[in-house]
Image: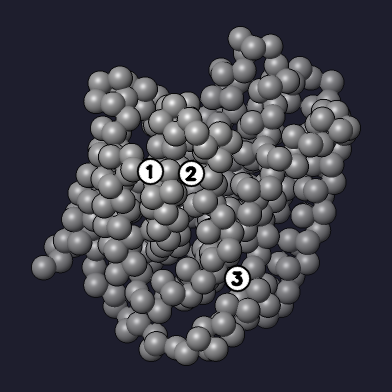
Amino acid sequence: MVRPIPPIALIFLLWTAGLMAGMQFGKIAVPLAEFRALYPHVGDSIGWLLSLVSLLGAIFGVVAGVLASTLGMRRVMLGCLVIGGLLSLVQSSFPGFGVFTATRVVEGVSHLGLVVAAPTLIAETANDKWRGTAMALWSSFFAVAFALVAWFGGTIIATVGLGGLFQLHGVAMLVIAGALAVTLPEPQMQRPPSQSIAATFRKITSAYARPSVLWPGVAWLIYTFTFLALLTVLPEQLPPDQRGPAGTVMSLIGIITSLLVLPLVLQRVPATVVVLAAFAATAVVIVVGTPLPLVARAAMIFVVLGLIQGGVFAAVSQINRTESDRALGFGIMAQTGNLGNLLGTPIVLALVSGIGLTGMFTVVVALFAGATGVLWVLGRKFNAQG
């Protein structure tokens, strides 16, 4: 029996589920050295344990949006939490590398379902006034999850071992699944009828032809392409004793901007306008900050990127009014975001190596200026369509 709870409590519970999805990456990325020791014979192939989840998202993001809409967001949310929790418990025994890799593939399915269903449910739960704030909160899930694993993961591993970290993650996912099972309302609207494979494929391809569905995905591609890359590359340009603190500060600045500044702005300015202005401002800040020390220049960049981080999620629910369209929008974001994460860091590293830091910044400025133009054109199209 479902027992409704206040909307704000349900939103925080769904956000907590998002933290669990972010930790599906963090539990591998943060203790990567421990995994190298566990599987010393695989060499650099250990990276697949992390990137396989992103690869699945880059390929199947929109498919996940369509399937979640068809199966029902509540069902997908609960199912993916249970699957993810059970997989963490299985992984805590650290089977052979091949088996572990296979579990990460399935875990990628769980992650995709969560990052499509959770924001869609948050958008449905929040009222019009606070929806932008709720989506800004959701946008922080990945960074907050990584920060929590980075801050507490070492202590947990030292206390209960690496397997204990995975067991805690698995149990937490199952507990959240249980909490949502008794608090997440049954859907008000009847789910769409099952579709043929051909009809599903047509729905997927048509999503890319709809400006309001595509717009957030384009913005998210550029954001993810640069955010993780700059967070990785810029600290390396600093003296060794400054690298760790600088990386932490850059990440926290984006979270603070997204959680504290953006909700106030969204009360008065549409999310699409905020994102468009932030894209243009990023290009300007990079140029204006040229004479400043790199730490100050990086801080300025990440302040503006924080507006994009939450603004794009808020834009999905503002420009797409139905649950189905929002699911498609979040599905495209899952796809383009994973693609950006996959490609951004190696390309930016190659740029710094080939044409230097100044040349890399020049390319990033051109990228953001071009993205501003593309987003403006797409925005005019869906505004014209009403």
Q: Residue furthest front?
A: 41
Residue 338 visible in the snapshot: yes
Q: Nearer the viewer, residue 29 or 383?
A: 29
Amino acid type for the residue under numbered disc 3: Val
To which residue does mark 1 refer? 96
* Picture quadrant where residue 210 is located: bottom right
Tally of numbered discs: 3
For label 1, count other residues whose C-alpha is less than 10 Å away and answer few (under 14), some (14-19) or many (20+).
few
Judging from the image, what secondary structure is the residue with disc 1 in?
loop
Question: In the drawing, what numbered circle is on residue 213?
Answer: 3
| Residue 105, image x, y percentages | 45, 56
Distance from Cα at disc 1 to Cα at disc 2: 12 Å
Distance from Cα at disc 3 to Cα at disc 1: 41 Å
Specify the quadrant that holds the C terminus: bottom right
Distance from Cα at disc 2 to Cα at disc 3: 31 Å
Question: In the drawing, what numbered circle is on residue 49?
Answer: 2
For label 3, count other residues whose C-alpha is less than 10 Å away and answer few (under 14), some (14-19) or many (20+).
many
Of callouts 2 and 3, the N-terminal one: 2
The residue located at (82%, 30%) in the rendering is 353
| Residue 142, image x, y percentages | 47, 43
* Picture quadrant where residue 7 is located: bottom left
Q: Nearer the viewer, mark 2 or mark 3?
A: 2
Horizontally, is 161 left or right of 2 in the view? right
Amino acid type for the residue under numbered disc 2: Leu
Judging from the image, what secondary structure is the residue with disc 2 in?
helix
The residue located at (56%, 82%) in the rendering is 201
In the figure, 131 relative to 148: above or below?
A: below
| Residue 208, image x, y percentages | 65, 74
